[in-house]
Image (cartoon, grey):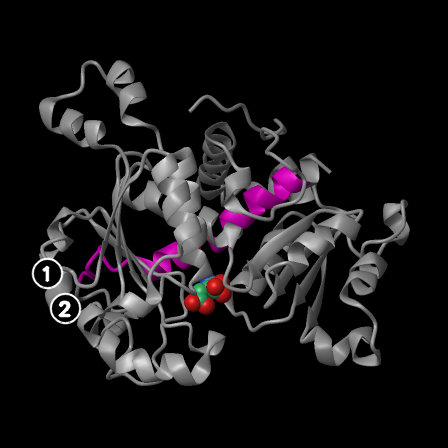
Amino acid sequence: MSMVFPGQRLPRWENAPHVLQTQQFDRPFLDALFAFTNHLLEEHRRYDDLWVSHIGVRRQLLSLFYQPSSRTAASFIRAAQNLGMQTYEVREPLQFSSEVKGESFTDTVRTYAGGNDHAFRIADVIVLRHPEPERVFEAAEVSRVPVINAGNGADQHPTQSLVDLFAIQREVGRIDHLHVGFVGDLKHGRTCRSLAYLLAKVGRKPSADKKDDASADGAKHVAEERGTRFTFISHPNLRMQPDVCQYVRAHGVSVEERADYGDVLPTLDVLYVVRLQRERDPDRLAALAPELVPLRVTPESIAQLSRTARVLHPLPVDSSNPDVSEIHPELCAQARSKSFRTEPDPRLAWFRQADYGVPVRMALLTAVLQWW
Ligand code: NCD
């Protein structure tokens, strides 16, 4: 990858500097973002000395979360601080902001994002998570500063997808010609929606690759001719929504939908697991939980995957009832194990995936600050 660091601008993306949905990104932007993230990871002992640690000085990131979060909010805050930014966190704004007094959401955003002089402004970047999908677009309309979508209802979670795709690149070694299985509550899971949009948009199409890789060996060539493939595995009531299916097919991705694993596991490069999103419809979805047991990831299903495949999960795993959790508790214990006596199975990759949250968000915030 030919990137010149330090100080080079990352490419501009559609509708920059806002980050609202993954369809905004294109391949040149992603290649540069991931090259820069790799650069940060390789330079991690020295990044304190780099221009990177100063790009956010005298800038403030506001984290405005109307829904719970462990990883997203915390990793944005750490990423911002690593860039020299200050951070201000409003958790549960419906209790602690003036919305309690009846202020409208857009007035709240306008207040935080107001003022032309950054020295006197409250926020220079707003990271917003909201249960109502349209709020993030309304925020971008009224905000004078970049708005980053950290999850808008059951719609999208674009920065999680950047983390997911970066994890795929690091763990599988490529983001093209992948066979990705998505399993779980595909109807309400915003992370699988965002990732499907993103992979379909940026994955190279087979015809272009035949030219690029004229010297590739036979096996590789067969994979490339196939291009990106998705298998959506879900209970019939939790199928991927038609907007995603239409978009990915229109972008040349072949899609199979099924209600069980069948013989698909050995052919996957990535198994992307999402939990049952109970909070979207508590009574109805809780009643479905026992029916999802055949789709849970177990030691037996892992044994069917190829050694180079990876199981990813945006987290959290719902461990509230270990008998129906989407990942078997034994695998969860293995994945988080600190024991160096037993080599953990590299296919259980979800905590390494989460660990990429800070560097990927550092790279994204750098791009946002550069285009702001
Ligand atoms: C996800 C989310 O909030 O959509 N969590 C996250 O940010 N990593 C996934 C989920 O809640 O299932």
Q: Which mark is residue 229?
A: none
User: Which residue corresponds to mark 2?
Assistant: 299
Q: Position of residue 193 (x, y in %)?
A: 42, 53
Q: Is residue 164 visible?
A: no
Name the element at disc 2. Answer: helix
SS class of the residue under badge 1? Answer: helix
- For the residue carrying disc 1, how many other residues have a C-alpha within 10 Å: few (<14), some (14-19), or many (20+)? few
Determine if the C-beta at disc 2 is less than 8 A from ligand 1: no
250 versus 58 height, above or below: above
Q: Quadrant of residue 47?
A: top right
Residue type at tag 1: Ala
Query: Which portion, as a residue range, is magenta?
Result: 343-368
Q: Position of residue 155 (x, y in %)?
A: 51, 58
190 over 316 or under it: above or below: above
Image quadrant where one finds the N terminus: top left
Q: Are marks 1 and 2 in contact (CB under 8 Å)?
A: yes
Image coordinates for residue 129, horizontal then vertical, percent: 61, 63
Query: How many marks overall?
Result: 2
Q: Nearer the viewer, residue 359 or 292?
A: 292
- The residue that appears at 25% across and 69% down in the rendered structure is 339
User: For residue 219, what is the image quadrant?
Assistant: top left
State the image coordinates of residue 323 (x, y, percent, origin top left): 24, 84
Q: Main secondary structure of the magenta part?
A: helix
Q: Residue at x 40, y 52 (%)?
A: 242
Q: Which residue is mark 1?
A: 303
